[in-house]
Structures are given as C-alpha cells and as structure tokens.
Amino acid sequence: MLKEWDIHSDTVDYIIKHTYHPDFIKKIGKNTIFLEAKGRFWDHAEHNKYVWVKKALPKNIELVFLFADPSAPMPQAKRRKDGTKRSHAEWAEANGFRWYSVYSIPKKWIDSSCVITENPDYPEELE
C-alpha cells in the first residue's frame, strides 16, 4: 500500500520547553551564579532536570548546589559492595556541578551578620 514511502528514514530532535527558577542569584563581575539550595532530591526526574538546565545555560552562568546534607544518598541509588550509596555530593561532582554545604560555602557569599558554627561531621574549611 505504501511501497514508495521510506520507513523511519529520518529523525527529528525536539525539546519540551520548561522554565527553571533558581533559588538564589548573584552576579560576580561578568558572571552569574544560580545557587540551588537542596535538602534532598526526591526522584530521578528532579535531579536529571538540573543536568538539562546546566546544558541550557550560557557560559557566563553557573548552577551551583548548596546541599543541606551532601552525604545524603541519592533516590533509588543502588547499594555498592561496600554498603554505601551514591551521595548528593558524588552526583554533583559526576555531573560537573560545584557544590557546597552550609559549612563550606565561601564566606564572601554569606551575609556577614550570619554566624555558622563548625560541624565535626563536615571537615571542609570555611573559605
């Protein structure tokens, strides 16, 4: 019936338009930082969204994470042989994101009236 028709011979890339609203925005010189404050990721769709957002950003904008608990396991993460699961920090690093905890965020980003006490569970030094 459709002898002269090609079957599945072409492909079309398409994009489903979404809108992202960063939690915090700071301009530093010619660059802009979008700071995303996360308690935790709830599912694959949520953390995958940030990979797509990063790809859509111009070079002068960086998406950075501020994790409440960088060592928290990723949702649906499989247990490794050593019994651990992939953490939020490991996910961020694997996907090329810079990340901080409240204990490691650069001091120059924090309001000077804010006092952050050290936490022995997070040995990162405050900058």
Image: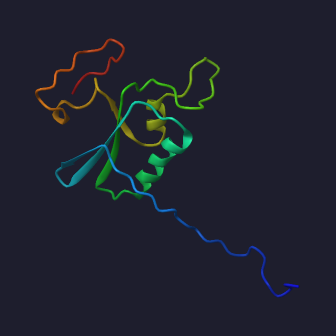
Quadrant position of the C terminus in the picture? top left
Residue furthest toward the bottom?
Answer: 4
Q: Is residue 52 left or right of residue 109?
A: right
What residue is rendered at 65% in x and 71% in y? 11
Q: Is residue 86 left or right of residue 126?
A: right
Q: Is residue 8 left or right of residue 58?
A: right
What residue is rendered at 44% in x and 47% in y? 50
Q: Position of residue 23 (x, y in %)?
A: 31, 43
User: Residue 126 occupies which quadrant of the picture?
Assistant: top left
Asked whether 3 or 93 is in front, the reply is: 3
Q: Give above or below for 92 relative to 9.
A: above
Q: Position of residue 8 (x, y in %)?
A: 75, 73
Q: Give above or below for 69 relative to 96.
A: above
Residue furthest toward the top?
Answer: 120
Asked whether 77 or 90 is in front, the reply is: 77
What residue is rendered at 55% in x and 67% in y? 14
Residue furthest toward the right?
Answer: 1
Quadrant position of the N terminus in the picture? bottom right
